[in-house]
Amino acid sequence: MEKGIIIQGMGGFYEVLTEGQDTITCRLRGRLRLEGERVLVGDRVKVSRTNAQEGVVEEILPRTTFLPRPPIANVEQVLVVMAAANPDPDLILLDRILVHAELAGLEAVVVINKCDADPAGAQALQELYRKTGYPVILASAKSGTGLGEIQEKLAGRVSTLAGPSGVGKSSLINALEPGYALKTGDISDKLGRGRHTTRSVSLLPLSSGGLIADTPGFSRLDMAEGEPEELQHLFPEFAAYVDDCQFRSCRHRDEPRCGVKEAAAVGKIAPSRYSHYLIFLNEIEANQRY
C-alpha cells in the first residue's frame, strides 16, 4: 500500500496525492463507508491501486489537527487574509479566526492584501498585529508585493487561507501559481463584501513543495466551545500582563487591579483586541448557560 493525502473529494470519489507525487482517484473501502466517519480534505491515508490512475482508500491515518470551518484536516498553519480596502478590513472576524487557530494549535500568519489600495491603513494594521506577536505580511496580488514572503511561509507545509470573500485569497494563489487560474470575484456594491467564488475545499500542490487549501469564504465564527478562563490564553499578547492581576481566576473584565485591563487602558494591548476579547468572553459565557 502507498501513503498519500486527500486533496479533493466529491460524490464519493477522492483525489489522493501519493508520496510519489502522482494523483489517483479513489473510492473508500466498504468498511470505511459503513463506519460513517467523515473523510476530509487533508486526511492522510493508505491506498491500494487498482490500476495506474485509480485506487481504494484502505485506511485513514490519525489526524494531527482539525479545522471545523472550513472542514479540513492536518493543516499546519493558517494564513489569515484581510484586505486593506475594498472590502474594509473586518478586525473582529480576523480576531475570531486567530482565536480558532490558537484553539486548534495552528501557527497563524496575518496577510494584509491589496496593501496598495490603502498603504497607510495597511501599515497601521501591520503595526497593530505585529505587537500581538503574529507575523504580518503586506501583500498585493496585483503588484506582487509580499509574494516572496508568502512563498517562504508556504514552502513544504500544509497551509490554508482563511478570511472573508472578496479579500483576494484566490487572487493570491493565482499570483503564486498562475497555472491554477482560480476563479476570482468582484465586490458586491449592494452588500459591500465579496461574492463567494470557491465552493468546495481542495488542497493545491505548490511548486515550493507545500500544499495550500483554497477554501470557501465565510463571514462568521461563533465561540461555542471552551471555558471562559481559557480564552485569555488565545490572545498571546495578554501573557505579559496576567501575572499582574490580583486574582488568579481573573477574567479581565470587572475585577479590580487587573493587569490586562491596565495594559489595554494605556495602549500596551490594542483597544480593538481587548474589546473583541470581551465580546468573545460574553459569547462563551452565554453558551455555557444552555
Image: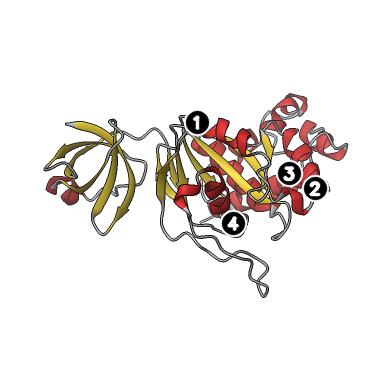
Q: Nearer the viewer, residue 11 or 153?
A: 153
Q: Check the picture and name the quadrant holding the N terminus.
A: top left
**Residue indicated by mark 4:** 164
**Residue indicated by mark 3:** 273
Q: Depth-wise, is mark 2 or mark 3 nearer the camera? A: 2
Which residue type carries mark 1? Ala
Q: Residue at x 76, y 54 (%)?
A: 117
Which residue type carries mark 4? Pro
Q: Depth-wise, is mark 4 or mark 2 nearer the camera? A: 2
> Among all residues in the image, which is located at the extreme bottom?
190
Alpha carbon of mark 1 to alpha carbon of mark 2: how far?
27 Å
Q: Residue at x 68, y 73 (%)?
A: 189
Q: Is residue 26 left or right of residue 8?
A: left
Is residue 259 shown above or below 143?
above
Look at the image and tell me whether residue 63 can be seen. yes
**Residue indicated by mark 1:** 155
SS class, disc 3: helix
SS class, disc 2: helix
